[in-house]
Image: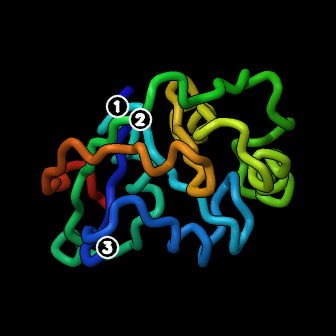
Amino acid sequence: MDVYRILKEPHWHDPLTVVGAEKAPGRWNPREQGILYTGSSPALTLLEIMVHLPEVAYEALPALRLFTLRLPENALRWINPQALPPGWDQPQALAVTQTFFAEWLEKPTELGLAVPSAVLPISYNYLLHPNHAQFGDIQIIGQVNLRLERRLWKR
């Protein structure tokens, strides 16, 4: 299964690092508990990055690179959206969502979890755990520099 990850320069040298997620908690992980956030498509992954980019002029946007990663077979557990806590997709729910998968964060039984995207809930993000035995089996099979279309950036 192929998944996608976008990084800003200068972080291209290590597309499998979770250091950023350890320093800045995300929707599904608390601080100091790094996981690798990936997406089901390049388009979804770009949307996820865009909502976190700073409000700057188009010319000041950071350079981006898309990585295609190949996961081992049967690496993911799919999460039913109805099993998620109410309001999971709202920013104020972070205290709840960051601990929702506490057991998996502490002791991962599978490489990743497939969770709906808060940006586009009909699509899925994949949370990959660096402490799972299969994390070392993730292959980087492609990378390409991205140029954000100017019409998408009207801030």
- Looking at the image, do the residues carrying marks 2 and 1 touch, with CB atoms under 8 Å apart? yes
Q: Looking at this view, is 2 or 61 the one in front?
A: 2
Q: Which mark is residue 11?
A: 3
Say which element carries label 1. strand
Residue drawn 65% across the image and 27% down it:
77
- The spot of residue 130 in percent (x, y) is 56, 56
Sequence-wise, which precedes: disc 2 or disc 1?
Answer: 1
The amino acid type, in three-letter code, at marker 1 is Asp
- The spot of residue 97 in percent (x, y) is 79, 50
Q: Quadrant of the C terminus?
A: bottom left
The amino acid type, in three-letter code, at marker 3 is His
- Looking at the image, do the residues carrying marks 3 and 2 touch, with CB atoms under 8 Å apart? no
Q: Looking at this view, is 26 or 142 the one in front?
A: 142
Residue holding disc 2: 71
Sequence-wise, which precedes: disc 3 or disc 2?
Answer: 3
Residue 120 in sight in this render: yes
Front label number (3 vs 2):
2
Question: What whole-number distance in Å separates the C-alpha atoms at marks 1 and 3?
Answer: 21 Å
The amino acid type, in three-letter code, at marker 2 is Leu
Question: What whole-number distance in Å separates the C-alpha atoms at marks 2 and 1?
Answer: 6 Å
Question: What whole-number distance in Å separates the C-alpha atoms at marks 3 and 2?
Answer: 21 Å
Q: Which mark is residue 41?
A: none
**Left or right side of 53 for 133:** right
Residue holding disc 1: 2
Say which element carries label 2. loop
Residue drawn 79% across the image and 22% down it:
82
The image quarter containing residue 70 is: top left
Say which element carries label 3. helix
Q: Looking at this view, is 45 or 144 the one in front?
A: 144
**Left or right side of 11 for 20:** right
- The spot of residue 2 in percent (x, y) is 34, 31
Q: How many neighbours does mark 1 have within 10 angstroms: few (below 14), some (14-19), or many (20 or more)?
A: some
